[in-house]
Image (cartoon, rainbow, N blue to C red):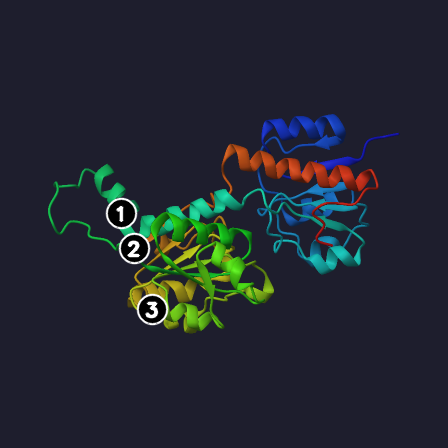
Amino acid sequence: MSKPRILVTRRWPATVEAVLAERFDVTFNPDDIPLGENELRLALSTYDAVLPTVSDRLPAAVFDGLPVVTKILGNFGVGYNHIDIAAAKERGIAVTNTPGVLTDCTADIAMLLLLSVARRGGEGERQLRAGEWKGWCPTHMVGTKVTGKTVGIIGFGRIGKAFAQRCHYGFGMDVVFFNRSPIDPAEAARYGARQLPTMEAVLAVADFVSLHCPGGAENRHLMNAARLAAMKPGAFLINTARGDVVDEAALIAALKAGTIRGAGLDVYEAEPDVPETLRRMENVMVLPHLGSATEETRTAMGMKVVDNVTAFFEGRDVPDRVV
């Protein structure tokens, strides 16, 4: 019996690629260049499975034009707002993701961003590397204390909880959060956190606001001009969720006006394009989508996809099926 034909759209950790090559008739992307819409449309008409990443855009239009033979999209990542789920479902295509395995590393990056913007870490490094540091003085690059401050978390799933744990038990922070569904107070207390009834209630009291909610149409521009204005004066915004959760134009305006003090960003609306204004702002810490970028996590993510796709073609229950 012939092996399922599979396309891997980007380069993955070598150990995962080796397992894929052993189990399937697999095609890799040796140049590691993101595929365009026409290439993805052709892939859906050629391969039994396509394994995309966040860099691959699969809107409804990609599923039109050619007969679709793909039976499963094994997404490399927990977020899947880059895939039109309704279009995939309409054509009988299963979609899976990789929850759980990137929780700790993404929470770590959120903590890195929070500390960096509070203590002006990126700004200080740039000054030193440019040879502009004149030596220690009492007023040089004074930042904001983290310990004992209030952090507000938007979205209290796995990553939100892991971030809360770091903030409360690592830095003695008061943790409040907004989540669309109620969280058992005893569960929240495990992470030193308490739920507030609205986003606005969180924004009003938080010295740092960290986003840990899904992207996509439902949450597009969740942080808009009005909500940025509702943040506590002098507060910081942290985003390791998805770029489209923040209205970047509104964020730039709020930073310019001093409505908020700064931002730490790992994700962007039109990745890999980041507005030059954001890149030039000293009170903004920018990272190139490093949330899950550790050897251990990226390998675990890849193996999650392998397990999902293997289960699918063996006719077993798929562990991480989205549709």
In the rendered image, is residue 201 in sight? yes
- Closer-to-camera residue (137/6): 137
Pinpoint residue 217: horizontal percent, then vertical percent.
59, 64
- Residue under label 3, please give it: 232
Pinpoint residue 49: horizontal percent, then vertical percent.
75, 41
- At numbered mark 2, what does the secondary structure look like: helix, strand or loop? loop
User: Within 10 Å of the Cα at label 1, are there few (<14), some (14-19), or many (20+) other Cα atoms?
Assistant: some
- Closer-to-camera residue (155/218): 155
Q: Quadrant of residue 299?
A: top right
- At numbered mark 3, what does the secondary structure look like: helix, strand or loop? loop
What residue is drawn where x is 39% and y is 64%?
Answer: 251
- Residue under label 1, please give it: 123
In the rendered image, is residue 10 in sight? no
Tell me the kind of residue under disc 1: Glu
**Which residue occupies the extreme right position in the image?**
1
Tell me the kind of residue under disc 2: Asn
Pinpoint residue 136: horizontal percent, then vertical percent.
12, 42
- Residue under label 2, please give it: 283
- Closer-to-camera residue (221/67): 221
User: Within 10 Å of the Cα at label 3, are there few (<14), some (14-19), or many (20+) other Cα atoms?
Assistant: some
